Image: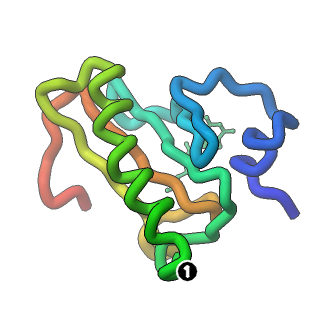
Amino acid sequence: MKTVFQKIIDGEIPSMPVYRDDKCIAIKDISPQAPVHILLIPIKPIPRLSLATQEDAELLAHLMLTAPKIAKEQGLQDGFRIVVNNGIIAGETVPHLHIHILGGRQMAWPPG
Ligand code: 5GP
């Protein structure tokens, strides 16, 4: 069964990406946890980070280098947080790798 992110990537669920290239798409989170909450999603459906392989090294680097660009475009020059929930115990609800980009408010640590 397709995940909600796969349906968004395939255009079955309409979305208004804030960023897109040949390797990834970025959308606003439907349930934002901060004034800015973007999901950066690779087109390749890796279920979670721990299932990425050496073959995905270039893609993972691309995501890490793209996240700060998106944060800057979203006005987060002062700072931002990125989060990857890996597995259900960590809070992952959609089994398609994605990077949360959060900002626009003071963040606490540890996050809980
Ligand atoms: P996870 O909990 O897996 O780390 O993050 C999944 C995120 O996807 C959640 O923050 C949730 O709000 C978001 N989400 C779930 N369904 C949709 C959707 O249909 N559209 C958008 N834009 N975000 C979604």
Nearest to the observer: residue 19 or residue 49: 19
Considering the image in quadrants, where does the N terminus appear?
bottom right
Whether residue 11 sits left or right of residue 90 in the image: it is right
Q: Which residue is drawn at 69% across and 48% down?
A: 5
Q: SS for tag 1? A: helix
Q: Where is residue 37 in the image (x, y as percent from the top left)?
A: 41, 33
Residue 36's image quarter? top left
Q: Can residue 30 be seen in this view?
A: no
Q: Quadrant of residue 14?
A: top right
> Along the horizontal axis of the image, is 35 left or right of 15?
left
Viewport quadrant of the C terminus: bottom left
Image color mode: rainbow
- Quadrant in the rendering for residue 110: bottom left
Q: In this view, does 44 lie above or below 38?
A: below
Task: Judge whether 35 appears above or below 95 on screen.
Answer: above
Within-10-Å neighbours for mark 1: few <14, some 14–19, many 20+: few
Q: Which of 102 and 59 is in front in this view?
A: 59
The residue indicated by pointer 1 is 51
Q: Residue at x 27, y 32 (%)?
A: 103
Quadrant in which ligand 1 is drawn: top right
Q: Which amino acid does label 1 sit on?
A: Leu
